[in-house]
Image: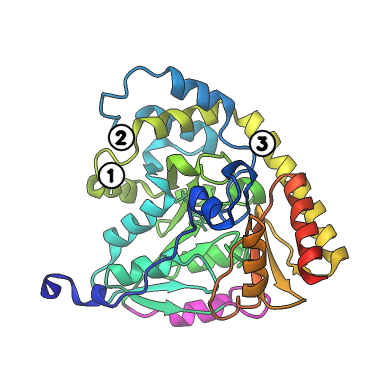
Amino acid sequence: MERLIRKHLASFQPYKPIQPVEALSEQAGISVEQIIKLDGNENPYGCPPRAKRALAEYERYHIYPDPSQRELRRKLAEYTGIGSEHIVISNGSDELITLIMRLCLDPGDGVITCPPSFIVYNVFTRILGGRLIEVPRDSRYEVDVEAVKSAIDDRTKLIFLAWPNNPTGNASPSEEGILELADCGPLVVVDEAYHEFSGLTVAPHVLQHPHLCVLRTFSKWAGLAGLRVGYGIFPQKIAQILYQITLPYSVNVAAQIAAKEALEDVPYLKARVREILQERERFYHRLKEQGILDPLPSQANFLLCRVLKGSAPELKRELDKRGIFVRYFDVPGLQDKLRITVGKPEHTEALLSALDEITR
Ligand SMILES: *Cc1c(COP(=O)(O)O)cnc(C)c1O
């Protein structure tokens, strides 16, 4: 059997996704409704009501979806201000990450990442037989553009930058730094999963830079993580080939309906984003006052916090027991930290009192 499996996959470190809420509920012995889930950067306000209604009323789930998602792409062109011929929609932006790699990588080709960052880039580079080139961030999690440039060799195909970065929450390098890298040869993939929270984007530059692309998702700001819709903005040529190599129906009917409805209801969603941003500022200051976790400034919907009292994994275990779930990464640079999604004010309060109780 083993000889059938590609060698490098037999002994391979998989990505550890977060647990489903039912498993968390069972683990804590607390009902699903009472779980406080702050580990996935999901939207605490849920799916937009308009999307729920449209999903309930739809009559043609027995028909295959539009493989080129014409209507949704038209709406995204309006939303982004960029022509639909540049837009590729996918089953979550994670799918686009792997598609870009499948488009560009021959075995041994280089992929630059700047850890600590989104681990999916590393995992899929390995799965596809690429060569991972890690250029670590500095102690303030800033990307060193010069170091990235000197790490580029003649087989480097891709540079992945989460901007703002997950899990650190900062947006580095600067826009100028990104554009500088986009002139260096490899394709620069700017992952803007948190764009609606940061207000930052390099999307308009894709039209002038043939080696630049942008990834976005409906998972975080639009409350559709469970439906899996992401998209990318690409030079037209790349967009065309990506559609040729993707699975024809990977974006299902429900996902397309929900994303279209979300785009019909942007003012509603932007109001929720503003609430989350207000709560992020309040949460940040409350944590600073409390003195148990030290949050870093963030441009996204989560705070990376250094644990000041006790150890991070221990604190996480204690929070787990109380039905409050946060994210811990057992990797260099993050072992003394927890990443906590910004929830509703009542989630913040429950977390703060749990922290008090645990460290008392
Ligand atoms: C959450 C996240 C994604 C994944 O988004 P999906 O569209 O749900 O696949 C991609 N990149 C970053 C940086 C993220 O934090």
The amino acid on which the numbered mark 1 sits, given as a three-letter code, is Tyr
Image quadrant in which you'd find residue 272: top right
Q: Secondary structure at mark 3?
A: helix
Which residue, given by chain and number where applicable, does mark 3 sit on? 270
Tell me the residue at 63%/61% (across/down): 321
Mark 1 or mark 3, whichever is nearer to me: 3
The amino acid on which the numbered mark 3 sits, given as a three-letter code, is Lys
The answer to whether marks 1 and 2 mark residues whose Cβ atoms lie closer than 8 Å is: yes
Which residue, given by chain and number where applicable, does mark 1 sit on? 243
Q: Is residue 215 magenta?
A: no
Give neighbour class at mark 3: few <14, some 14-19, many 20+ (Cα, 10 Å): some
| Image position of 62 with respect to 213: above or below | above
The quarter of the rendered structure image containing the C terminus is bottom right
Measure the alpha-carbon separation of dots 2 and 3.
Answer: 27 Å
The answer to whether marks 1 and 3 mark residues whose Cβ atoms lie closer than 8 Å is: no
Residue 185 seen: no
| Image position of 320 with respect to 262: above or below | below
Which residue, given by chain and number where applicable, does mark 2 sit on? 68
Q: Tell whether 222 sits left or right of 149.
A: right
Q: Specify start and end residues of the magenta stretch as a single range.
A: 137-154
Q: Tell whether 108 sits left or right of 195.
A: left
Image quadrant in which you'd find residue 136: bottom right
Mark sitting earlier along the chain (1/3): 1
